[in-house]
Amino acid sequence: MESDKKIEFKKVIEYFAYAAIAIQAVFAAFWLFKNTGILQNDYVAHTYILAADSLKVDDGMGILYALLVKLLGHGVLLQIFQILLLDLSVFLFLRSLLEKRVGNMAALIIVTNPLILQAETAVSPNALALACVLTILWAAFGTSSGVKRICTAAGASLAAGFLNPDYAYLFLIAGIVYFVGDIIRNKRVKAVLAVLIVLSFAVPVLTNGLIRDDKAYGRVHRSTEFLIAQRVVWPRIYENKVLVDFWEENALGTTGSVSLIDCDRSPEKLSMEFGYRYEELTSVEDVRALYKLMYSNAFKKGFGYWGIDIVRDELLYFLAPGSTAFVFLKQLTDTSVSSGLNYLFREAPKISKIYYIFSSAVMLLLTVLYLIKGVVDIIGRKKLPGKTAAFGLMALVFLFSLYGTFICVREYDYRNVLFMVVGWLTAAIVLTERKKTVC
């Protein structure tokens, strides 16, 4: 009887998912009809369209994506390419973890999600970078030969590093953790794995370092000093006016070269006005010394001054995409959610908002239902077959949340952590639905 109840609960979840897919697919088709060929003309799109002509990239841009935009243009062809590649990687990844029926169900929920569709139709490397992440995970969870899996993962990691330079560092961290775990699990060192991890990191980093032009698009290089200042000083730059005036007087013999109040109004202006202007007037080294003075001053004011914002942003990124819906419904204004959703809603505002809210509710409910199923299995002392996979996925969710919090431009932006749309739901499902024979 107890087993029958478990099976019945599983069927209820699946019936709910199928009904949700049918409705969400209609919304997705309508949204694609209205948005295919439409340019989401934000700063990222603008710079990559320029980069396609000049083949110049700064330290936050990928030369491979600029080449793709040059080859495919920034219209329908690029959108179709991104849709096909990301959707294929979603299906392959989920089919490597879950039985065919459940894997297809989860994949359909994800590929018809509006945040995924928005990324796929944007001139941005985010969709293809996610495809690389899922390809690596597909290789990690597959049962093909070890060398084949390692080479597939290395190739995807290499591509991601050329799509977005930050991903070379993210994959290095993940690769080292995986490498150490593999040694512990198998009691031996895989030299091929070690070499490919190093190469898939070093090749894009060195290449990007040689070809990049840090000021090509009005920004400055994201040095360690800049990133710390971005994290702990903004949006209180004006509070450092006395310090900045003193620095300016010594470096320039004048003051007031940059409006500090204006810089506090937008997080991008720390790079595009404050840093850029002062580097032009003095030198990179001098401005980095100023960053250091500013964040040292902030640290002296205690954790309550700079740390609460870090905790808040970390929670928003870690709990994405649920936190995105929360920010939207609460109409919070101190994030970048509204600017992202404005592009999502632009072509059909009323229906697109209903689509987004419906999809968010479905994603949340399915995640919660599968977590409840896992708790029920634990209470019933049933072994959870997907604990290791779920833990690995949540580790990646945490890694991407740290990336969004400490590296990306300030103010929470769900577009920085697209992996969360896949990671949370898949981790919840795989706990109890892990494929018995992985292929």
Image (cartoon, rainbow, N blue to C red):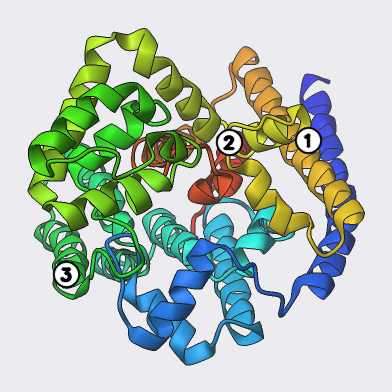
Sequence-wise, the earlier of marks 1 and 3 is 1
Q: Position of residue 278 (x, y in %)?
A: 22, 49
Seen as rendered, the residue at the extreme bottom is 71
Which residue is identified by label 2?
A: 335
Q: Mark 1 and mark 3: span between their CA atoms?
A: 46 Å
**How far apart are the alpha carbons under marks 2 and 1?**
37 Å
Mark 3 Cα-neighbour bin, 10 Å: few <14, some 14–19, many ≥20: some
- Cβ–Cβ below 8 Å for labels 3 and 2? no
Residue designated by label 1? 10
Answer left or right for 73 relative to 370. left
Percent across and percent down for residue 96 are 52, 58
The N terminus - image quarter: top right
Identify the residue at horizontal 38%, vertical 9% (top origin): 304
Looking at the image, which is closer to me, 225 or 317?
A: 225
- Image location (x, y in percent) of residue 186: 20, 43
In-front residue for pair 232/389: 232
Q: Is residue 393 left or right of residue 321?
A: left
Q: Kindly identify the amino acid type of the residue bearing the numbered disc 2.
A: Thr
1 or 3: mark nearer the eye: 3
Disc assigned to residue 203: 3
Q: The residue under label 3 is which amino acid type?
A: Val
**Mark 1: which secondary structure?**
helix
Marks counted in the figure total 3
Q: Is residue 30 above or below residue 106?
A: below
Near-viewer residue (166 or 193): 166
Q: Circle 3 sits in a helix, a strand or a loop, which is it?
A: helix
Give the amino acid at mark 1.
Answer: Lys
Residue 247 in the image, given as x and y percentages of width and height: 15, 33
